[in-house]
Image (spheres, rainbow, N blue to C red):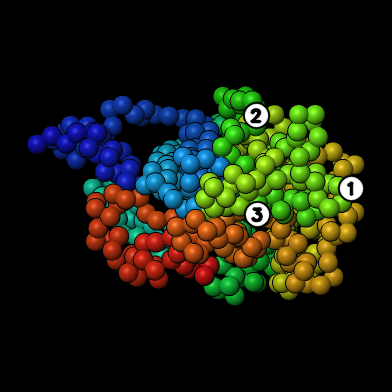
Amino acid sequence: MKLHKKSYQHLIFILGLFILAGSCHDFEEINTDPTRMTDINAASLLTQTIYDAGTRSRAYGEIGNYVGQYWTNTSLIDQRHRYDFRGSDSEAVYDNIYRTLYDISDLKKKAEKEQLDDYLAAGLILEAYLTTYLTDVFGPVPYTEALQGDKLNFTPKFDSQETIYRGNLEKLDEAYALLETRPGGHFIRGGDPFYGGDNEKWRKLANSLKLRMYMKMVKADPSVKAEIATLIEEGELLSSPDETCAIIYDGRFGLQSTNATGTSGSTALGETFANQLHETLDPRRPHMAVLGVDKEGNPINLDEEGNPVYMGVPSGESPDIIRNFSGLSAPYTGMNGKRAPSVLISHAEVEFYIAEAILQGYIEGDASARYAEGIRSACKWWGVQEADIKAHLAKETVKLSADTEEALKQVWREEYINFYYQGYDGWINYRRTGYPEFKVGSAMLTDRILKRMVYPPLIKAVNQENYTRAVNEYLDNGDTMVSSGWWAE
């Protein structure tokens, strides 16, 4: 009986195990895809995996914007801000990440064969980033037995979130060591859209991803406070705005941009996000959204002091309630007139983590200075002019409070704003901090804030035994939106 390629693709995308090809009669043929290039160079593989890590793995990115309450849909058609998801919504993240991991596996094999340690390190870093992202969205997922299609393992076990985190910390350490020795030079084959082959920046990226992971882990494992302190003290973290790890669509490496305009009339800023921006009259607002104005061009909505209000609409409400709002601000589809870069982790994010670590007592330092540097970096990223940044930092509503609890809320506010256009990341960080307060709308399908995405529907059928074991062992409320994770309640 012949095994058709189409059947393999359907099965393996659901499992996250990837394409096995062809009609064949022995194992070697089964594991050879006749349509796949067999000798891609390391540079091309690196470019492709970087692009996929920032774009294809974040397919349906607007879902993250709804989940993070950055956007709200004002139509009857798309109600995902009410947690009314389709099965394809989970597949968009799950399947695409595993597809990208398959390409990363090719990159690692190529790098090992040609002794290109820097390319191998890049593969490990991207792998750690994506699998951490995956488990943060879903909880337990295939990890130690993933990517075993060559062994005909189409029903991999699911690993706990803790197992995945600790495994990825080891991968990041391994990557750092490979980049430290630099036996193959600075990505001598090229193909690095992130840092142009700068090993030092890649090492900073590895450490910064570790810091992000530790900041999420610390409640579940307080011992990592020492690791947080060590990373900050040693200082090898993203340290300037130009070290933000992002894919910028500027034509290099074939990564073309598209013009950014206001979104269609069915999308508006979420009230949660809009309120955080208005609290300090954030200068990034005109770069992020369109102000609602009348026919004469005057703002429709003003606050009590006469300041223009970039009006947002509550998440999770019915269209009947949403229609009562006028002059809503439509978010731009990009940044500074161009397609928004795909950010994996920013310099501003790192600065906010350091400020938070100081306030939490993990390490000594000047929290106010790191907080201000984070705001400065984030504003520069959005194209705010220096004079406006200085004026913003001088506002009483922006200056870091002397009260630790209030200061933490200010840092968390800035973290939340900084994750704009990284919607899932903003939601993940909310689950870590509980700030800002997310709205439970009257039309939401649950009376609690989403804690995880449910698994793609067909995974239950094709890997039922391991799926059931994972749900029973790791998910306190089953395969539902309100099951808690390892590091977040």
Q: Mark 3 points at which residue?
A: 272
The structure residue drawn at horizontal position 63% and vertical position 65%, both measured from the top left corner, is 433
* Crowd rating for badge 1 (residues with CA inside 10 Å; few <14, some 14–19, many 20+): few
Q: Quadrant location of residue 97?
A: top left
Task: In the rendered view, tell whether residue 104 sits above or below residue 367.
Answer: above
Task: In the rendered view, tell whether residue 130 sits above or below residue 449.
Answer: above
Q: Nearer the viewer, residue 275 or 196?
A: 275
The structure residue drawn at horizontal position 62% and vertical position 42%, both measured from the top left corner, is 268
Are the residues at dot 3 and dot 1 in contact (C-beta closer than 8 Å)?
A: no
In the rendered structure, which amino acid carries the disc numbered 1? Lys
First in sequence: mark 1 or mark 2?
Answer: 2
In the rendered structure, which amino acid carries the disc numbered 3? Thr
> Mark 3 and mark 1: span between their CA atoms?
25 Å
In the rendered structure, find residue 390 and report the number of the disc placed on it.
1
* Crowd rating for badge 2 (residues with CA inside 10 Å; few <14, some 14–19, many 20+): some
Tell me the SS state at disc 2: loop
> Of discs 3 and 1, which sits in the foreground?
3
Whether residue 248 sits left or right of residue 373 in the image: it is: left
